[in-house]
Image (spheres, grey):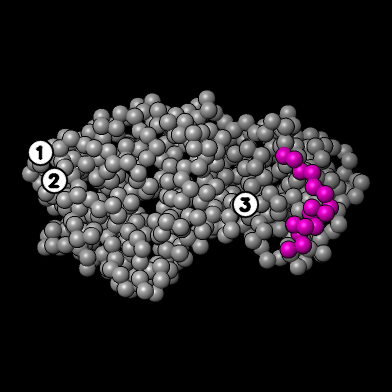
């Protein structure tokens, strides 16, 4: 049976169908209760076939990113040169397209971001183009249907990327907006379809297994939210009802391997065992069904009648399904949680051990602070500033209060701030006799001396520093901007420019006149978030807020 055009649209931007020589079908494999060794045997055989068939991965949904993702996440022995060849092709393609991978189908960007995440690439800088930025445009991302927000979320969450700011967007995207769009499209039967749910008239459409599986993959990370959990439960019930007696799934009335793969990956992303009773029919499970499409030595076929022989798209999807299964069995990160991915490429002459270099204009005294050891705290789990706190703590820039506590909501003293800003820039400690309240025998003396010498922090008066005083938001802004200038950032801003930015806040007049250009710069550069309803310029800032400000500044200064 020939595949429908709709089915090919699911492959994230498919434009060209690659032809594969027909191969004979062998007997269906797989019994229930496969061991890890048996899964590993099939995985290695399919990986070998895929690696030999895709001699050089290109930019595309077949013979491209899905092969890269599967092989990178599988642990199969693939030379780094193979991944580097893909990256070279991606750079060439991106330059040719002037950074516009597709004007309509933004899933092309999501697919490439996932591939780069899997091999340690930087999607914000491919031949000088930022391939993350398009996902900051909500309207354009959802233009092609529910595929857009689904894959945008999966891509953004693969390495916990910040949602990129897209200044050209009519509506700036957020994670919450993408989640809401997916939930809005849920059908009355609990599932999802490519076009259903968009209007009241289409909500009565029947769910599609592929799209429902993909939607669950995107929502998996947010299952602790009550609205998301409710949607997931309904979708799982829908999928269970859709499952056939042979353990498989159909799309457009055609049983096929891709559909069961998407359900397998969804359950693994959700942490649900594949032998969950809801997904075993007449003794037939999901893995049994998927492996019935397997042809030893020749990948996977699309349908059991084997028309057309082995199929590369089917093989690529089945292969990353196998990888998802293997990773679940071995207790590793899920397929799309790529925070454990290793660098497989060298970008722009860099090696994977090269440290960031900072901006060209940074002061020679500023030094890059490498990660010493990954550090976290029990009281910052799921905190909105967790990423910033952990990034600074892992570089010994900021410390906790006690062995396992950070105390994120506590205020910070001026002496503590002097210490972390000096640590963040790697400045040498300096003695000072300028301040009467900074004795040389105090732990903070060298930090205050350095921060003052480099113009980051001044005293409360000519000869007092007030080391135990707390820091207000406007004071923190001034200090961070002074540090940013040392790092090579252009911090110049006129009073008029600052007022234009700050006037959106009803309490901006409460800020001191001297502080407004500093605050304006911080809001303009997203060091402080313009999503806040008020400024509260004179309120003492919290430890978590200062960590976030420094983290964002260092990121813009290319110190991370």
Residue 474 visible in the current orientation: no
Labels 1 and 2 touching (C-beta < 8 A)? yes
Distance from label 3 to label 1 (Cα)? 53 Å
- Given residues 458 and 39, the one toward you in this image is 39
* Quadrant position of the C terminus in the picture: top right
- Given residues 312 and 308, the one toward you in this image is 308
Residue under numbered circle 1 = 24
Q: Quadrant of residue 343?
A: top left
Could you say whether the residue bearing mark 2 is in a helix, strand or loop? loop
Q: Quadrant of residue 119?
A: top left
Up/down of 527 relative to 433, above or below: below
Q: Is residue 507 left or right of residue 104?
A: right
Residue at the spot 52% in from the left edge and 39% down from the top edge: 99
Could you say whether the residue bearing mark 3 is in a helix, strand or loop? loop
Residue 284, x across and y down, in percent = 14, 58
Residue under numbered circle 3 = 167
């Amino acid at each position: 049976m020939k595949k429908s055009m709709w089915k090919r649209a699911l492959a994230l931007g498919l434009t060209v169908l690659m032809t594969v020589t027909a191969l004979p079908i062998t007997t269906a494999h797989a019994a229930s209760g496969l061991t890890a060794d048996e899964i590993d045997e099939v995985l290695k055989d399919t990986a070998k076939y895929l690696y030999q068939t895709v001699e050089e991965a290109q930019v595309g949904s077949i013979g491209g990113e899905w092969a890269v993702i599967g092989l990178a996440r599988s642990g199969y022995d693939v030379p780094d040169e193979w991944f580097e060849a893909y990256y070279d092709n991606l750079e060439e393609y991106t330059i040719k397209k002037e950074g516009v991978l597709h004007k309509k189908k933004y899933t092309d960007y999501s697919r490439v971001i996932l591939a780069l995440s899997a091999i340690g690439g930087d999607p914000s800088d491919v031949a000088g183009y930022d391939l993350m930025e398009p996902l900051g445009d909500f309207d354009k991302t959802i233009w092609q249907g529910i595929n857009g927000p689904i894959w945008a979320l999966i891509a953004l969450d693969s390495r916990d990327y910040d949602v990129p700011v897209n200044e050209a967007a009519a509506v700036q995207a957020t994670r919450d907006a993408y989640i809401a769009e997916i939930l809005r499209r849920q059908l009355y039967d609990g599932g999802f379809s490519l076009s259903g749910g968009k209007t009241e008239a289409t909500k009565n459409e029947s769910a599609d297994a592929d799209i429902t599986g993909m939607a669950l993959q995107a929502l998996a990370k947010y299952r602790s939210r009550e609205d998301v959990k409710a949607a997931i439960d309904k979708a799982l019930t829908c999928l269970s009802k859709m499952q056939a007696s042979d353990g498989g799934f159909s799309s457009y009335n055609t049983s096929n391997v891709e559909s069961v793969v998407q359900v397998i990956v969804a359950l693994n992303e959700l942490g649900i065992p594949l032998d969950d009773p809801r997904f075993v029919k007449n003794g037939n499970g999901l893995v049994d069904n998927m492996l019935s499409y397997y042809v030893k030595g020749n990948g996977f076929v699309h349908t059991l009648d084997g028309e057309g022989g082995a199929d590369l798209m089917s093989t690529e999807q089945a292969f990353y399904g196998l990888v998802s299964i293997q990773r679940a069995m071995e207790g590793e990160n899920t397929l799309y949680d790529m925070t454990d991915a290793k660098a497989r490429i060298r970008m722009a002459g860099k090696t994977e051990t090269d440290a960031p270099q900072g901006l060209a204009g940074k002061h020679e005294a500023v030094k890059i602070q490498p990660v010493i050891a990954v550090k976290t705290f029990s009281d910052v789990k799921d905190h909105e500033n967790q990423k910033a706190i952990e990034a600074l703590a892992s570089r010994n820039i900021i410390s906790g209060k006690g062995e396992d506590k950070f105390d994120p909501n506590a205020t910070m003293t001026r002496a503590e701030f002097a210490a972390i800003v000096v640590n963040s820039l790697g400045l040498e400690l300096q003695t000072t006799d300028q301040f009467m309240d900074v004795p040389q025998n105090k732990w903070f003396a060298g930090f205050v001396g350095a921060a003052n010498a480099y113009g980051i922090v001044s005293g409360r008066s000519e000869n007092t520093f007030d080391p135990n005083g707390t820091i207000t938001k406007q004071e923190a802004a001034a200090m961070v901007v002074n540090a940013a200038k040392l790092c090579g950032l252009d911090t110049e801003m006129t009073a008029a420019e600052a007022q234009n930015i700050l006037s959106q806040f009803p309490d901006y007049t409460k800020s001191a006149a001297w502080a407004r250009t500093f605050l304006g710069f911080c809001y303009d550069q997203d060091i402080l978030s313009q999503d806040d309803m008020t400024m509260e310029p004179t309120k003492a800032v919290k430890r978590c807020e200062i960590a976030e400000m420094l983290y964002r500044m260092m990121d813009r200064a290319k110190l991370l």
